């Protein structure tokens, strides 16, 4: 009961019908002759999984009213956005939420941060910031929106949450095409549940009347409710269905993700070899760390014989792409003295506040002699004062992210020996 004695508006997720029970009567209407599994040579990359469907709920309603472990709030970088979702969450959560958000000091695009639910039925609120969509920077927007959904799910997993209620993260004022965004949302959740399904009991997509038809149309592509529906949906899947985690993939980035998380490029203004490392291309959860050490030494051994610099792109890097401090300490301890002596600078591009704090702790308490070599670089324009742009091979998503956040860069800058 609310303070006025009226019945509670909150809706228990356990009372909502699962996706596998919705519209079952219409899902195979176009099949006059049911298709036998043995008759079909090609299966969907999102095959029929009754166990996953049982976890999914599509619900037309206000996400703020869901009684589940956590609901998702879509906001802006300062966490002060006023949109129908956030305004309803603020109204039902009460004034304490605003005070709590001020302590978070904002949230970067694609990241996710946690607060208590206060007066909501949900115990927690996961706040995330969707990208502003411009067709020119579509790749960056896709990557950022994927990061929103993935980071929310990762946070839910880390906090051992049972159920999560998603709003539609892309708000109208950020201009993300609804259908494109829905593809990313559905496939990211699907891929996460395929690997970590045991950690979540329910995932609710809370949609408005405007959004419901799009979700109804696309849900069968990623969560087919029968083998027949799987085959029927196959021709309607988009060309880009993402990688094994649902992340958007373009050919240029795929090469670097699968084969080359670090590559030597040209030289800086002082003639020193430049080694580039792309954080989001490091498949931490998929690689053998002992082999990774050997690989690093193999790549770097001929470079470290003379002075060199490292450029580390932290752009849109998620928590699960970051090497932990134990691995980095082991790497630092095991490499030959020439690696440490000849490393003259480490440019840390597009750092987050959290990554700066982690780096400070690492270089202060874990290793010595590295702190003075680290330079935090907020924009490519700043990087290009030390390394000419023609001397470094930039992944497309880094260029697009920087252009969106800092404006387009220019091809010539006054030379500078250091940042």
Image (spheres, grey):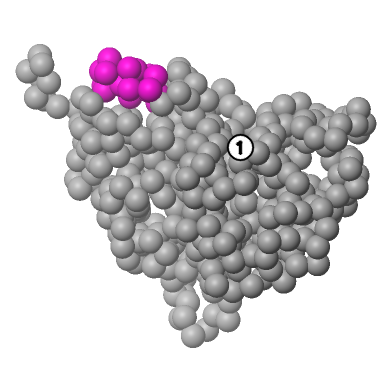
Q: Is residue 198 magenta?
A: no
Q: Quadrant of the N terminus?
A: top left
Work out whether 68 lies above or below 298. above
Please say whether residue 128 is visible from this viewpoint.
yes
For the residue pair 341 and 100, the one nearer the viewer reads as 341
Q: Quadrant of the C terminus?
A: top right
Work out whether 39 lies above or below 257. below
Identify the residue at image location x=25%, y=42%. Answer: 69
Identify the residue at image location x=41%, y=35%. Answer: 113
Element marked by disc 1: loop
> Where's residue 228, x and y in %?
45, 69
Residue under pointer 1: 351
Q: Is residue 95 magenta?
A: yes
Work out whether 243 lies above or below 373. below
Horizontally, residue 33 falls left or right of residue 267, namely left
> Where's residue 338, x and y in %?
73, 61
Q: Quadrant of residue 51?
A: bottom left
Identify the residue at image location x=46%, y=34%. Answer: 128
Instruction: Report the span colored magenta.
Output: 85-103
> Where's residue 82, x and y in %?
45, 17
Identify the residue at image location x=19%, y=45%. Answer: 15
Please say whether residue 214 is visible from this viewpoint.
no
> Where's residue 224, x and y in %?
44, 62
What secondary structure characterizes most of the magenta part? helix
Label total for image = 1
For the residue pair 185 and 351, the one nearer the viewer reads as 351
For the residue pair 200 and 97, the one nearer the viewer reads as 97
Q: Residues within 10 Å of mark 1 (few under 14, many from 20)?
A: many
Residue at the farthest left position: 5
């Amino acid at each position: 009961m609310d303070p006025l004695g009226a019945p509670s508006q909150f809706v228990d997720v356990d009372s909502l019908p699962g996706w596998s029970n919705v519209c079952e009567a219409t899902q195979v209407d176009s099949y006059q002759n049911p298709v036998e599994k043995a008759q079909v040579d090609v299966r969907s990359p999102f095959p029929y999984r009754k166990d996953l469907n049982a976890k999914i709920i599509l619900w037309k309603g206000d996400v703020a009213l869901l009684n589940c472990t956590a609901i998702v709030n879509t906001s802006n970088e300062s966490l002060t956005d006023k949109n129908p979702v956030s305004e309803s969450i603020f109204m039902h959560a009460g004034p304490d939420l605003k005070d709590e958000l001020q302590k978070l000091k904002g949230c970067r695009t694609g990241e996710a941060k946690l607060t208590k639910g206060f007066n909501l039925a949900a115990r927690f609120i996961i706040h995330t910031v969707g990208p502003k969509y411009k067709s020119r920077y579509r790749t960056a927007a896709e990557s950022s929106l994927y990061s929103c959904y993935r980071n929310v799910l990762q946070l839910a997993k880390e906090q051992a949450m049972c159920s999560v209620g998603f709003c539609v993260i892309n708000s109208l004022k950020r201009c993300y095409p609804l259908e494109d965004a829905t593809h990313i949302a559905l496939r990211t959740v699907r891929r996460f549940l395929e690997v970590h399904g045991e950690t979540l009991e329910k995932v609710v997509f809370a949609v408005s009347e405007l959004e419901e038809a799009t979700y109804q149309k696309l849900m069968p592509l990623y969560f087919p409710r029968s083998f027949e529906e799987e085959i029927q949906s196959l021709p309607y899947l988009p060309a880009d269905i993402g990688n094994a985690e649902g992340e958007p993939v373009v050919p240029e980035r795929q090469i670097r993700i699968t084969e080359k998380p670090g590559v030597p490029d040209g030289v800086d203004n002082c003639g020193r070899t430049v080694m580039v490392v792309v954080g989001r291309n490091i498949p931490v959860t998929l690689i053998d760390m002992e082999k990774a050490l050997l690989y690093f030494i193999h790549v770097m051994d001929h470079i470290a014989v003379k002075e060199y610099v490292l450029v580390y792109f932290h752009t849109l890097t998620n928590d699960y792409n970051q090497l932990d401090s134990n691995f980095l300490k082991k790497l630092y301890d095991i490499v030959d003295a020439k690696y440490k002596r000849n490393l003259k600078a480490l440019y840390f591009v597009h750092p987050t506040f959290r990554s700066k704090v982690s780096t400070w702790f690492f270089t202060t308490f874990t290793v010595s002699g590295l702190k003075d070599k680290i330079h935090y670089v907020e924009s490519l324009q700043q990087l290009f004062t030390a390394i000419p742009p023609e001397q470094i091979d930039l992944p497309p998503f880094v260029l697009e992210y920087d252009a969106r956040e800092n404006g387009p860069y220019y091809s010539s800058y006054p030379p500078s020996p250091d940042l």
